[in-house]
Amino acid sequence: MESLQFKRLLFKAAFCVMACDGEVDESEIREMQAIDKQTAYFKDIDLSAELESLVQDLNKQGIEILKTLFKDLKKSDLTITQELLLLEVVLRMIYADNKVDENEITFLRIVRSRLKIPNEIINDRVGVIKYLSGVNKEW
């Protein structure tokens, strides 16, 4: 997947995991800012404009924004590196507020189900995540 297109997808995934529990915690916003400052993951993206667009989409579409993300992930041709980056960002956002919500677990499982990367590579990269399996296929 093209770099800028992937960065937008990555940003959208980070936003959606923040919003999926119905509450955007200040610590999640700080984590997004840290990701932006410490990595090149969101480089070349106008974060303010992208965030404003996603908030508008969330207000208009509600849960459909998540379903659109999951469909986009399913049809995307991501490299193994891109898939690992996506999982890393999602996990960082989940753990940012020091509480793991059931909706975040479901979100993670659905994201995982859309990726082609073998579990062994994920385990080598981030360790074993006990609630990574058990995917809801209807999404």
Image (spheres, rainbow, N blue to C red):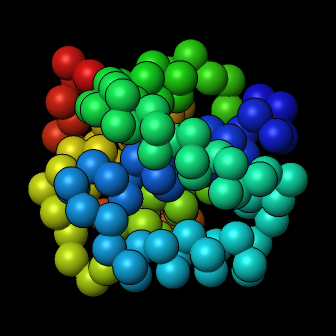
Q: Quadrant of residue 95?
A: bottom left
Residue 127 locus on image (x, y percent): 42, 70
Q: Is residue 128 visible?
A: no
Q: In which quadrant of the rendered image does the C terminus lie?
A: top left
Vertical position of residue 9 compared to residue 31: above or below: above
Which residue is drawn at the image coordinates 18% and 30% (left, top)?
A: 136
Which residue is drawn at the image coordinates 51% and 77% (left, top)?
A: 31
Residue 13 locus on image (x, y percent): 49, 46
Residue 33 locus on image (x, y percent): 61, 75
Depth check: 137 or 39 in front? 39
Left of 24 or right of it: where is 133?
left
Vertical position of residue 36 compared to residue 57: above or below: below
Residue 78 locus on image (x, y percent): 67, 32
Which residue is drawn at the image coordinates 86% and 53% (left, top)?
A: 44
Vertical position of residue 47 compared to residue 25: above or below: above
Vertical position of residue 95 compared to residue 44: above or below: below
Q: In which quadrant of the rendered image does the N terminus lie?
A: top right
Q: Is residue 106 visible?
A: yes
Left of 53 or right of it: where is 107?
left
Depth check: 119 or 105 in front? 105
Which residue is drawn at the image coordinates 27% and 83% (left, top)?
A: 98
